[in-house]
Image (cartoon, rainbow, N blue to C red):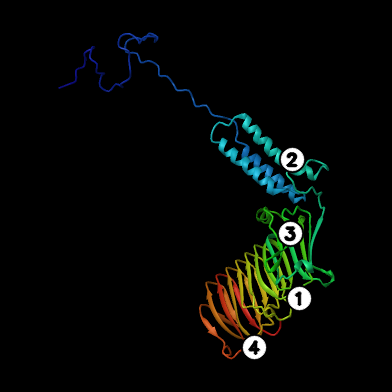
Amino acid sequence: MSANPNPDPGSSQPPAGSPQQPTYSQTPPQGQPPYYQGQTPPQRQAPPPRHSHRPDFVLPLLLIAVGVLFLLNQFGYNINWAIVWPILLIVLGVGIIFSRGRTPGWVVAILVIVIIAAVVFTVLPNVIPGFPNFFGGSSMQLGELTTNTVRASQTDLGSAKTLRVQMDGSIGSFALRQDATLGSTAVQLVTTSNIKDLAAPTLASSGSAYQVSIPAQPWNWLIGWTMNWNNVRLDRDLAINSTLPLDLQLGVTSGKVVLDTSANPIDRLQLKMTSGELNLNAGTKASLLSPDLVFDFTSGVANASNLGFTNFASLDIGFTSGSGRFALQGLTAGLHRASVHITSGDIRLLVPQRIGYRVTTHRTSGSIQVDGRSYSDENYESPNYASAVIKLDLDLRVTSGSVSVDLTDTF
């Protein structure tokens, strides 16, 4: 049976195979232009979406401002980062919020003005004498050095049992030394710098200790990593004329630390360095305090001598990377504990020949050597350990790198 070649003109069904599109069968709808029967009306096209061609330049402008501030700081101009950083972060946050929609032009203008003001008013006070310094801090010319001195007398120390030195996240250099020429002055701290020291050091009694506090600057954690300190100077010289035991709690972001404690026994030493260099001379005056000594390095170089004279109860050395030489001459009678845990690096311990020692080792890779013998994961006790007057228990753990313990009389 074949399809009807002449379909009924009044039928509502379109011929087979023809597309089904809307047509006007009789008269066009009201208000529409006339169309003939069966003619397909033109299709309306949606208007193209409107795109904003205004660039989002808040973040690039902010990065440029920060770069200019870093560059000027590198040239020696003082930038008060404690004030500038919050302003820049606020500008960035506002810019991110308004970037998610249509940002009014007046908002963008305000952001631009704030960024420019943050740059101008932190730079011009260092360039133009008398220019208002709205962001605080000192106005120092390039290369200008300032010196601040704080002192404490023997009377100020009063009945203190220890002299506590507390330094948090310092940069630059720090030196502690004995100076008998101070006379009646027992403690004197001199700071020399060409940058603004935001947190001034303080001297005050704290319980049974007389405390020297050197707070961290809020921007140390950032600038210590990002700046080249060839043009920046921050030196602290702490001179003491006292035989009080020293309680040293030192945190160093980057820099150099020189400690000469030859005239004072050490009651406690806790040193944490992110990077830098340490030179320590514990002196040759035997102590009876049995302190705990802690050296915690992320990276850096350490050189410590005469540690045995401190009569330490425990010595803890931790290195993520770096190198260190620790001379334990002067060890007194009794039992001492020393542990060395390193991720990578090269650590060397020098100990007197006649001691008795006991070793616990664990090595992932690298090397561990004690008195010329290599160790991996094992325990060992020297033949003279039980009878030795001086005993040293060693806990040596190496992930990658090397630890060597040399028995010697040459330090």
Residue 263's label in the rendered image is 1
Residue 202 coordinates in the image, percent (x, y):
73, 60
Figure check: 185 above or below 4: below
Q: Quadrant of residue 220?
A: bottom right
Q: Nearer the viewer, mark 3 or mark 4?
A: 3
Residue 98 coordinates in the image, percent (x, y):
57, 35
Q: Residue at x 52, y 81 (%)?
A: 379
Q: In the rendered view, does 222 fall on the left or right side of 129?
A: left
What residue is disc 2 on? 120
Please tell me which of labels 2 and 1 falls first in the chain.
Answer: 2
Figure check: 240 above or below 171: below
Figure check: 308 above or below 235: below
What residue is disc 4 on? 354
Please tell me which of labels 1 and 4 falls first in the chain.
Answer: 1
**Contact (CB < 8 A) between labels 3 and 4?**
no
SS type, badge 2: helix
Residue 40 coordinates in the image, percent (x, y):
35, 15
Indicate the amino acid at tag 3. Pro
Indicate the amino acid at tag 4. Arg
What residue is disc 3 on? 201
Quarter of the image with the C terminus in it = bottom right
Callout 1 crowding tier (Cα within 10 Å): few <14, some 14–19, many ≥20: some
**Contact (CB < 8 A) between labels 4 and 2?**
no
SS type, badge 1: loop
Please tell me which of labels 2 and 3 falls first in the chain.
Answer: 2
